[in-house]
Amino acid sequence: MPILNRIAEFHDEMTAWRRDFHAHPEIAFEEHRTSATVAAKLEEWGIEVHRGIAGTGVVGVLHGAGGPTGRSIGLRADMDALPMEEGNGFAHRSTVPGKMHGCGHDGHTTMLLGAAKYLAETRRFDGTVHFIFQPAEEGAGGGKRMVEEGLFRRFPCDMVFGLHNWPELEPGRMAVRSGPVMAGADKFEITVTGHGGHAALPHHTVDPVVVAAQMVLAIQTLVSRNVSPTEAGVVSVTQIQAGSAFNVIPGEVVLRGTVRALTNEVRTLLESGLRRIVDTLPAAFGAEASLNYIAGYPPTINAADPSELSAAVAATLLGTERVLRDVGPSMGAEDFAFMLNERPGSYAWIGQGGSALGCMLHNARYDFNDEILPIGASYWALLVETALPREDARAAAE
């Protein structure tokens, strides 16, 4: 198809961009080099550029051939890397110790840049497209901050779309569903306070280790005995910190973990259940406990109509049989959810390599598959041209 062929002509150029981003990873709100590179390329192509949104965020504004029409669409790519050491040895491996593009945001940024370059050349659409390059997706809430700083007030969008690579899908496939697609993710810290003493004289203590162990077991019932079997939720205790000597019962134990759910209703139910355990169970042992519950990303919930549009565009590009509509949601989290809370939209997955490439996200051996760069860029471009068709095309369709 023409879009894929035109974008394929600068595939090598996109590959060079992507590998440059990979070699120079920047973590949350530190994406100064990345955002400067993005802004410079957008300006080179004649796209209006706005910098400094959420610190290092960039928004490019491009009007179609007919200028602004009041119709608009937002396309979002995340830019940040992870605070982890890379295990690869190829030429474009990270040059920054302890930082790595282990989730493919280098590829996401590149695919959106490829679409921006193409759309700036052709402008075969009517209306306005906003290219949203977001910082700090990896746990720091850059999407939330962009929204709070007036993203959609400054850059109105009728719909907003996100795209993420997925290693479990082979190249040339995409997946999109309406409804929940990623979980909400919260954190908790429970401090259990007892009365420490000699391990040989436990009857003189209130052992917080025993209390904490009982709490861990009770926490396992929050999903199994409180959440409907047709709903999804996860509560995982991931850290237990206590004691400093083999013969001392400590006075305090700290439990930490995560709560995940696909709906806000289940999310609230699990938080309430956790608070109930903290408030009641320790007292039965003569101990006390406190809970610090930290709300994180809400569930990522795709709207129906934008998801149908996304799937139709993907089918046009790849063929209907290569677009998965019945894929299950992930219990991972994504701060694109904050944008979807403000505007209808959809978040899709693009096949990155399947089992042949071997690495899931957040793995020290992960690398983005450069072969899919033209597919992602073509999807973005066709999405804009489909969502914002030219007046003559709409008239012909009517």
Image: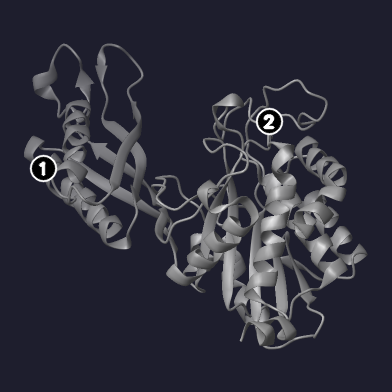
Badge 1: residue crowd in 10 Å (few <14, some 14–19, many ≥20):
few
Q: Residue at x 63, y 80 (%)?
A: 156
Using the numbered discs, state the Cα–Cα distance from disc 2 to disc 1 in whole angstroms.
Answer: 43 Å
Q: Position of residue 326 (x, y in %)?
A: 40, 50
Q: Left of 172 or right of it: where is 89?
A: right
Q: Which residue is mark 2?
A: 98
Which is more N-terminal, label 1 or label 2?
Answer: 2
Between 386 and 226, the one nearer to me in the picture: 386
Q: Is residue 299 above or below residue 254?
A: below
The numbered dot on residue 283 is 1
Q: Left of 386 or right of it: where is 61?
A: right
Image quadrant holding the N terminus, namely bottom right
The numbered dot on residue 1 is none
Q: Position of residue 167 (x, y in %)?
A: 56, 36
Q: Left of 23 or right of it: where is 193?
A: left
Report the number of discs. Answer: 2
Secondary element under disc 1, as helix, strand or loop, is helix
Q: Residue at x 13, y 19 (%)?
A: 202
Secondary element under disc 2, as helix, strand or loop, is loop
Between 310 and 159, the one nearer to me in the picture: 310
Image quadrant holding the C terminus, namely bottom right
